[in-house]
């Protein structure tokens, strides 16, 4: 365990990283070409088609603050944030029903041109000031922030993905619409679960090699399986949805082999499937696979283990005490540097607008189940601070778990497993606590 002073420093850093900002996803006809050829200056061209986000283009002119950021995930467990590039607000002007930004070659970050209107968006950057993007990558993304609204476009299916070129494949119309519906649902903007399911199924029928759609479809099935899940008395719906999620994630893991997170999700689904079917040999094999995936990417893939293993074993068990709790210490305390090195995994800066609040709530529950009352109270308390400042929708849950932390520990550590307080979402359904806006 960390000392009190070390926890205090970590808490201060976490508070500074906790702000949740508005977030909008761009998916329509998205395509990117990053070049890094020897003897030539690096650059990028990003195009997005007629996306709903720009149906009414936001005004970027002064006094609005605007910026661009490029980032990427590098296998097996790397992340590169190429930094926020502040844009000169005086260089924006109205153009064709939208807005256009033009800057000279020596502009910060090499950002030369940005244009967006109801017909789409184009970003061009390059030259000496541009940080090159060199493959292979797991995914690459661009963020355009306009007056506090972050517009994200992420690329994961590639035609080329090497040191000289990272070039994405344009998604099908169903894939783009399905991705939008998926995140509408997970963020709880305007939940469109059935639309997401229908569109993503159409996308993979149209192109079975669409790894991004296979991944999102697999995660959607797990999302459906985890709703009100009872690991001891699964419904036929739960069994079927978890199996479907496992199957699509297996395909995605092969198609998107550079993204080591996907294999972790698949391992979690495999463990859940074996446990739900009372398959002891399958549980043991899946647990070994989970351990292997956690070793590859500890900061991220540990949450695959946290989601499915703690709800299914006793907090007093040897595995919980010697594997789950030390892994939690490793992730939460011993890897505090991830706040800087992996901001999209360890702060609220990525696609989980309440990542810190939800993570600390879940990890507080796991500490309580393992009998660590002081640790549970510490992280519940910090989650409460974040939630208050970020208008967290599950704030009442944090307050309740903090108020009853001692009771949760006592019930989890007695000899009656039937009275153990459940983890948030029973573990497997905890994704909404981070991803719901």
Image (tube, rainbow, N blue to C red):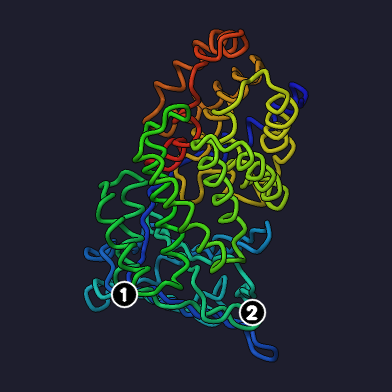
Question: Is 57 left or right of 179, judged from the image as shown?
Answer: left
- Provide the residue designation for mark 1: 49
Question: Is 120 left or right of 35, judged from the image as shown?
Answer: left
Q: Give how far across and how far down residue 36 sits, in percent.
A: 63, 82
Q: Look at the picture and state if 399 lies above or below 107.
A: above
Q: Give how far across and how far down residue 177 sits, in percent.
A: 29, 64
Q: Look at the picture and state if 233 lies above or below 410.
A: below
Near-viewer residue (366 or 288): 288
Q: Give how far across and how far down residue 2 sits, in percent.
A: 76, 26
Q: Quarter of the image holding residue 161?
A: bottom right
Q: Look at the picture and state if 411 lies above or below 218.
A: above
Secondary-structure class at tag 2: loop
Q: How many marks?
A: 2
**Labels 2 and 1: the sequence-earlier one:** 1
Near-viewer residue (418 or 171): 418
Measure the C-alpha gap from mark 2 to mark 1. 25 Å
Identify which residue is drawn at 60% across, 75% down.
130
Identify which residue is drawn at 61% across, 73% down.
133
Q: Quarter of the image holding residue 388?
A: top left
Q: Quarter of the image holding residue 188?
A: top left
- Provide the residue designation for mark 2: 162
Near-viewer residue (106 or 324): 324
Question: Is 5 left or right of 164, judged from the image as shown?
Answer: right
Q: Is residue 126 visible?
A: no
């Amino acid at each position: 365990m960390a000392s009190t002073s070390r926890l205090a420093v970590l808490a201060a850093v976490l508070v500074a990283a906790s702000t949740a900002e508005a977030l909008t996803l761009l998916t329509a006809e998205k395509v990117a070409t990053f070049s890094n050829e020897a003897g030539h200056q690096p650059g990028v061209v990003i195009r997005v088609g007629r996306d709903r986000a720009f149906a009414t283009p936001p005004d970027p002119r002064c006094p609005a603050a605007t910026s661009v950021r490029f980032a990427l995930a590098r296998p097996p467990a790397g992340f590169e944030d190429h930094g926020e590039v502040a844009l000169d607000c005086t260089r924006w002007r109205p153009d064709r029903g939208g807005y256009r930004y033009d800057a000279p070659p020596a502009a910060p970050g090499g950002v030369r041109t940005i244009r967006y209107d109801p017909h789409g968006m184009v970003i061009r950057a390059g030259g000496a000031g541009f940080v090159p993007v060199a493959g292979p990558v797991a995914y690459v993304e661009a963020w355009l922030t306009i007056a506090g609204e972050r517009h994200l476009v992420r690329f994961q299916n590639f035609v080329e993905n090497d040191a000289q070129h990272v070039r994405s494949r344009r998604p099908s119309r169903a894939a783009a619409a399905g991705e939008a519906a998926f995140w509408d649902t997970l963020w709880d903007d305007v939940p469109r679960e059935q639309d997401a399911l229908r569109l993503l199924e159409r996308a993979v029928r149209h192109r079975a090699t669409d790894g991004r759609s296979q991944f999102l479809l697999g995660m959607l099935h797990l999302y459906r399986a985890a709703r009100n899940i009872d690991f001891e008395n699964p419904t036929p719906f739960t069994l079927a949805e978890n199996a479907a999620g496992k199957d699509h994630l297996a395909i995605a893991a092969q198609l998107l082999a550079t993204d080591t997170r996907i294999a972790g999700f698949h391992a979690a689904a495999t463990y859940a499937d074996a446990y739900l079917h009372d398959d002891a040999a399958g549980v043991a094999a899946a647990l070994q696979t989970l351990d292997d995936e956690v070793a590859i990417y500890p900061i991220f893939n540990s949450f695959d283990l946290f989601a499915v293993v703690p709800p299914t074993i006793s907090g007093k068990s040897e595995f919980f005490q010697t594997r789950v709790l030390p892994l939690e210490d490793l992730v939460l305390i011993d890897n505090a540097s991830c706040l800087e090195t992996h901001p999209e995994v360890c702060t609220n800066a990525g696609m989980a607008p309440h990542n810190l609040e939800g993570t600390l709530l879940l990890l507080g529950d796991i500490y309580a189940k393992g009998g660590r009352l002081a640790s549970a109270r510490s992280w519940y308390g910090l989650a409460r601070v974040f939630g208050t400042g970020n208008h967290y929708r599950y704030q009442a849950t944090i307050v309740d778990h903090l108020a009853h932390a001692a009771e949760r520990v006592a019930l989890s550590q007695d000899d009656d497993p039937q009275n153990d307080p459940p983890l948030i979402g029973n573990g497997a359904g905890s994704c909404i606590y981070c991803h719901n806006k």
